[in-house]
Image (tube, rainbow, N blue to C red):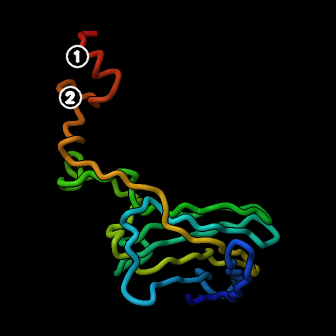
Amino acid sequence: MTASGAETSVTRAEACSVLSVKAGTKAEWPGVTFAPATGSWDVAAFRHVAIALTNKSDGPLQIHARLDNRGSDGTTNCVTSSITLGKGAADTLLLPIQSPWQVRGIEPLIGMRGWPRQPQTSLPDPSRATQLIVFLAKQTAPREFAIGTVRAQGSVVHLPAKIFFPFIDEFGQCVDSDTSRACRRGG
């Protein structure tokens, strides 16, 4: 673990150890980075990373987390999420790794001529996560938060393409929708 623009300390608690992060005002993105000792983490079997957080500051605090693949620049090859906690509040930030289901044996789905540019909502290669960063945006006053347990969790269902496709019927409706069934019945 490395800190950037922050001081850290570990407190042992009954259930787990807690990492306190005191963020200063000089760094653009103060926080901490966790990386595997060697290689990368394989989180491909999981849906998200759950990070237990507590705001130890005097007011509300927005805390961000990012999971990277090699070559991440903060926009590509990574996923980012955030949570806003009130003074003294504790909650769990869920950082998405991938959708709850994966279709095997097909190319990625792309509509018509492409798709709208959107923030990345899943890690490009969940079998090769290189680091986890928990951070704040630049602060005008020192702020403090605590990180409790960090877990990869949530199941992912793998569907063979034969089960998933076709999902649009001859009327252009989702096969499993009420509209599709009504069209097939004739009204």
Q: Secondary structure under badge 2?
A: loop
Mark 2 packing: few (<14 Cα in 10 Å), some, or many (20+)? some
> Is the residue marked by circle 1 packed among few (<14), some (14-19), or many (20+) residues within 10 Å?
few
Rendered location of residue 4, percent (x, y): 59, 88
Picture residue at 50% right of the left edge, 65% below the top: 49
Q: Residue most toward the front?
A: 14
Q: Is residue 120 visible?
A: no
User: N-terminal of the two: label 2 or label 1?
Assistant: 2
Quadrant for the C terminus in the image: top left
Foreground residue among 14 and 2? 14
> Mark 1 and mark 2 in contact (Cβ < 8 Å)?
yes
Q: Position of residue 117 (x, y in %)?
A: 35, 57
Q: Badge 1 is on which residue?
A: 184
Question: Taking 155 as reference, is 161 above or below it?
Answer: above
Q: Which residue shows up at 38% across the image and 63% down it?
A: 45
Q: Is residue 127 above or below residue 86?
A: below
Q: What SS does tag 1 mark?
A: helix
Question: For this rendering, which residue is in front, 76 or 126?
Answer: 126
14 on left or right of 111: right
Task: Kindly identify the amino acid type of the residue bearing the numbered disc 2.
Answer: Asp
Q: Residue at x 30, y 52 (%)?
A: 158
Using the rendered image of the protein, determine whether residue 40 is visible from the camera's viewpoint: yes
Where residue 175 sits: x, y (%)?
26, 29
Question: What amino acid does circle 1 point to?
Answer: Arg
Could you give the CA–CA distance between mark 2 and mark 1, rounded to whole angstroms?
Answer: 9 Å
Q: Give the quarter of the image for residue 31.
A: bottom right
What's the mark number on residue 169?
2
Write down the quadrant of residue 25 in the picture. Answer: bottom right
